[in-house]
């Protein structure tokens, strides 16, 4: 998979080059490019924002630099996503859909009061939101989307089955997990996880997934 992220602040994306994703990037398992929108500005001062027609607080990203930045990487096979509070809320199913159906993902990061509507009309295939709240820019949401999608790229994770047995994979939360020591601060690992009976362990895991979901996210059970 190839991901191009269009942003005014490429320096914010160092976390995507660390840990698991960093190792996969070094092995060329996926391609990640950071495109500085400001470098496409034709303004002699590299200005990328202006006042909003009709009034309103703040400034809006102007269309020319962003359009040229998008067109510099967009092809007929690209899927262009704009991170926006107006967008479809990101879910695990949406992540899997993008990971399975898209080979070239372009992520556009807005800033200030957002981007000119004409860019959305001309270039954007889908708007995506990471939740019902507002951030100072689209960089953090873009990192969330990229991280979530890249986990489904083969060989990024240590085991390709890791994405199967986890929270939201079957619309339930993950079961509690334990490691050594068997006892810590008076709390012990459940005996069923130690007795070696795999049938009983799987039964316990299934029961715990329902219990954890009922306790922390009962709305998922309603769905």
Image: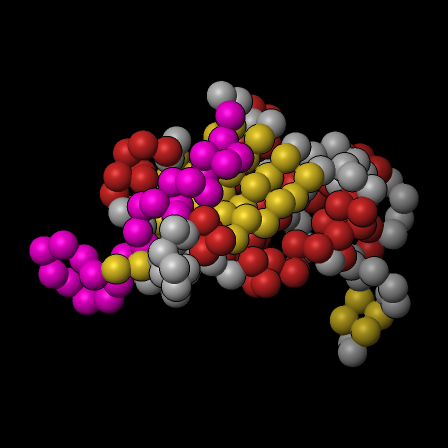
Residue sitting at x 87%, y 52%: 194
The residue sitting at 42% across, 40% down in the picture is: 68
In the image, taking residue 12 as reference, residue 132 lies left or right, namely left
Q: Is residue 11 above or below residue 33?
A: below
**Relative image position of residue 72 (x, y in whole percent):** 50, 36
Residue 136, image x, y percentages: 39, 65
Is residue 186 visible to the viewer in this orientation of the structure? yes
Q: State left or right for residue 25 relative to residue 91.
A: right
Magenta part of the protein: which range?
51-75
Where residue 198 sits, quadrant-wise, is: top right
- Quarter of the rendering occupied by the N terminus: top right
Residue 203, percent from left and from top: 71, 39
Q: Position of residue 76 (x, y in %)?
A: 49, 21
Viewer-closest of 122 and 147: 122
Residue 222, visible in the rendered structure: no
Q: Find the residue positioned furthest to the left.
A: 54
Residue most extreme to the front: 44
Quadrant of the snapshot with the C terminus = top left
Q: Quick check: is 1 in the magenta stretch?
A: no
- On whether residue 69 falls in the magenta region, the answer is yes
Residue at 59 percent across and 63 percent down: it is: 11
| Residue 3 appears left or right of 78 | right
> From this viewpoint, which residue is outermost toward the top?
76
Residue 88's place in the image compared with 177, above or below, is: above
> Front-most of 1 and 182?
1
Q: Residue at 60% x, 27% y: name it.
A: 103
């Amino acid at each position: 998979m190839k991901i191009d992220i269009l942003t005014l602040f490429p320096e914010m994306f160092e976390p995507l080059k660390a840990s698991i994703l960093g190792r996969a990037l070094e092995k060329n398992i996926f391609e990640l490019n950071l495109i500085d929108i400001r470098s496409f500005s034709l303004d002699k001062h590299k200005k990328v924002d202006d006042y909003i027609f009709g009034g309103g607080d703040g400034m809006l990203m102007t269309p020319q630099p962003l359009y040229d930045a998008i067109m510099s990487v967009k092809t007929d096979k690209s899927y262009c996503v704009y991170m926006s509070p107006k967008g479809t809320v990101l879910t695990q199913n949406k992540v899997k859909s993008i990971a399975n159906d898209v080979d070239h993902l372009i992520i556009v990061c807005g800033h200030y009061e957002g981007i000119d509507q004409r860019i959305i009309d001309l270039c954007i295939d889908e708007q995506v939101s990471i939740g019902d709240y507002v951030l100072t820019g689209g960089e953090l949401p873009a990192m969330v989307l990229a991280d979530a999608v890249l986990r489904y790229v083969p060989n990024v994770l240590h085991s390709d089955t890791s994405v199967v047995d986890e929270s939201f994979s079957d619309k339930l939360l993950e079961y509690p997990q334990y490691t050594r020591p068997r006892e810590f601060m008076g709390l012990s690992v459940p005996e069923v996880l130690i007795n070696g009976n795999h049938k009983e362990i799987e039964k316990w895991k299934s029961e715990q997934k329902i219990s954890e979901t009922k306790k922390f996210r009962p709305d998922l059970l309603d769905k």
